[in-house]
Amino acid sequence: MHPPIGPIRDSEGGTDFIKSLYEEVSSIMRSHQVPIDNTIVDQYMKGLTKLSYHFKTSMQRDMEKGLNIEADHLQGYLLNLAEEHQLNAPLLYASYQNHKVYKEMLQ
């Protein structure tokens, strides 16, 4: 089961988890010299509060339909950059592993 953003955001530690994941990704991007705004995490967190309780990402909707997902192109790419820059990204890795298991179950 993959809940929408509302229950995740409202659960104990949910918002902190999301913010920490955003911080991991922004750290990876900065290490790769991507010109992102210094307040990008805060901007995304403000946006998170505006999402509908029932909002689901397109990847999540694809998973619910049993479709292939682009985890290697998104999370996998970011993890490769993290490794290249010797950064630890445990939350991103956990997300990627979840998506890899899903993809293996499709086969």
Image (cartoon, rainbow, N blue to C red):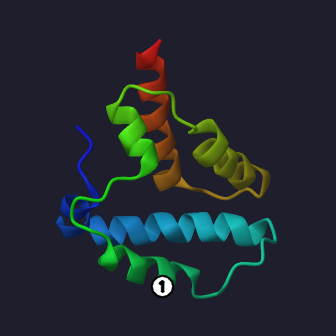
Where disc 1 sits, the SS reads helix
Residue sitting farthest toward the right: 33
Q: Tell me how many marks there are.
A: 1
Residue sitting farthest toward the bottom: 39
Q: Is residue 5 above or below residue 69?
A: below
Residue 9 place in picture, x, y as percent: 25, 67
Q: Name the amino acid, label 1.
A: Asp
Left-right relation of 77 to 33: left
Residue 67 place in picture, x, y as percent: 45, 27
Can I make out residue 12 in this image? Answer: no
Left-right relation of 29 to 10: right
Residue 87 place in picture, x, y as percent: 67, 59
Q: Residue at the location (74% across, 53% down)? A: 81
Name the residue beneath numbered marker 1: 42
Instruction: Please identify the quarter of the rendering in which residue 27 is found.
Output: bottom right
Residue 105 place in picture, x, y as percent: 41, 18
> Which quarter of the image is occupied by the N terminus?
top left
Left-right relation of 64 to 84: left
Would you call the spot at circle 1 few (<14 residues within 10 Å), some (14-19), or many (20 or more)? some
Q: Residue at the location (32% across, 78% down)? A: 50
- Give 56 or 28, whichever is nearer the viewer: 56
Left-right relation of 53 to 88: left
